[in-house]
Amino acid sequence: MSATARVNAVPAKQSELDRELEERLVRYVRIDTQSDERSTSSPSTDTQYDLLRLLVEELRSIGAEDVRLTDYGAVLATIPATTQSPVPTIALLAHVDTAPAFDGTGVKPIVHRAYAGGDIRLPDAPDVVLSPTRFPYLGTKVGDDIITASGTTLLGADDKAGVAIVMTVAHHLLRHPDLPHGPIRIAFTPDEEIGRGVHPNLPDDLKADVAYTLDGAELGEIVHETFSADKAEVRVEGVAIHPGQAKDTLVNALHLAARIVTALPHVTLTPETTAGREGFIHVYEMSGTAAVADLHFILRDFELEGLAAHGNLLQQVCATVQATEPRARITCTVTPQYRNMRYWLEQDMRPVELAREACRAMGIAPISTPTRGGTDGSRLTEMGVPTPNLFTGMQNIHGPHEWISVQDMARAAEVCVKLVQLW
Ligand SMILES: [Zn+2]
């Protein structure tokens, strides 16, 4: 292709990286990979294999080595070192599943080429409007190529943007053996959104000294601090009997469950009333009958003392309601989920410092905001592989307003290419 034809064929603002990232993201988001918390299999849904198997093929076709799909549904591969000197093995990770929280089937990605500013209306839901007034970050992306869904589904940039970035970086490094770097491991994991992304075998299979997840948001974001997280399950067993003969015998589990919920704080300590460094107790599911009711909670805090206090408060409320009705049986089980990665990373900040240096080298100001959530890196860090989270550009995740700038993704890919060389 002549140089002129090439320039004419693509929008002026798009680089080679931009084009590859856009092409990959648009293709990957069309594949339904929603995970399912109710499933006990690993991965939780078979549809995730559609993307996992495609990634195996694509990694082989770009010349990656040791490509394999593990029996727990992770794709692993190696990009061999281009330098002889002994350097740490760096892993780049992204998750293939999308959040079960919103419809993720039949995603129709739309590229809004060279965004001119103003509102973006989505064709399948006229009331879903992306407005820079409501989403100020969008207002900073005038001229960029913006990708959205069509209004009725999420986009799935979380985390197919990460998948597209890791694949594009792998492809770029394999085509440029002149760039000096150590061994690089690639991993695509399932079920991050339901907190099961890190299988117990993953750290051993990954064989990396340091890892980075590509699962962060705005330009320059480098996260080394996440929530510490527990979940809690409360079971209320009442006394069941035919309502016609229930006088003085029926103990209604639903009434007791409702009292537990109303006794918990409403105007503080909930996700909708907290921000920044505050933690919360969140009841996210109730189900049951007059005989038995189940309440599902997540407990979150940046500090372990705060997390323990949330668990204690819930236990106390359960004990108080139990005391009012000895014929019922109320149990509350608190289970650890993941821990703030800061506890490990602050002992050796090199993985974070080098990521910041890579950003600055690309002219991007690094930002570190504590994430009100967890990543696969939270568990991996706890299991011995320090894993900060890097930006991808994804915005308004888990809903119909999700969007991403192709050029933000390209900056993330450039930071990764720089970062592996810095190591
Ligand atoms: Zn994610």
Image (cartoon, rainbow, N blue to C red):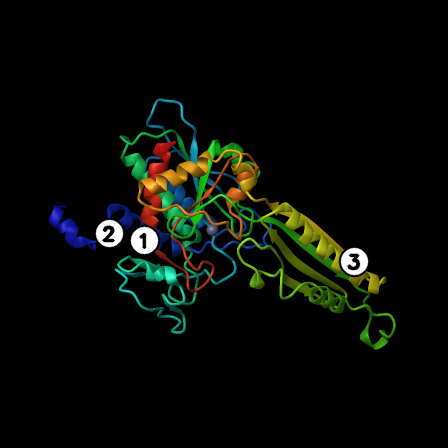
- Relative side of 129 to 295, left or right: left
Q: Which residue is mark 1?
A: 406
Location of the C terminus (image quadrant): top left
Q: Amino acid at mark 2?
A: Gln
Instruction: From this view, report whether residue 250 is shown above or below residue 159.
Output: below
Q: Which residue is mark 2?
A: 14
Foreground of the two, 48 or 407 = 407
Q: Whole-percent x and y of residue 420?
A: 37, 34
Would you identify the image quadrant in which residue 75 lies? top left
- Relative side of 15 to 384, left or right: left
Q: Residue furthest bottom?
A: 244
Whichever of callouts 2 and 3 sits on the residue coming sooner in the sequence is 2
Label 2 close to label 1 by CB (< 8 Å): yes
Q: CA distance from mark 2 to mark 1?
A: 9 Å
Whichever of callouts 1 and 3 sits on the residue coming sooner in the sequence is 3
Q: Report the mark closest to the observer, 1 or 3.
A: 3
Would you identify the image quadrant in which residue 360 lies? top left
Foreground of the two, 398 or 54 = 398
Q: CA distance from mark 1 to mark 3?
A: 52 Å
Q: Amino acid at mark 1?
A: Val
Instruction: From this view, report whether residue 360 is shown above or below residue 48.
Output: above
Foreground of the two, 37 or 40 = 37
Q: Whole-percent x and y of residue 389?
A: 46, 44
Binning the other alpha carbons within 10 Å of mark 2 as few (below 14), some (14 to 19) or many (20 upward) gives some
**In the rendered image, is residue 312 in sight?**
yes
Q: Whole-percent x and y of residue 227?
A: 56, 49
At mark 1, the secondary structure is helix
Binning the other alpha carbons within 10 Å of mark 3 as few (below 14), some (14 to 19) or many (20 upward) gives some
Q: Which residue is mark 3?
A: 319
Q: Which mark is residue 102?
A: none
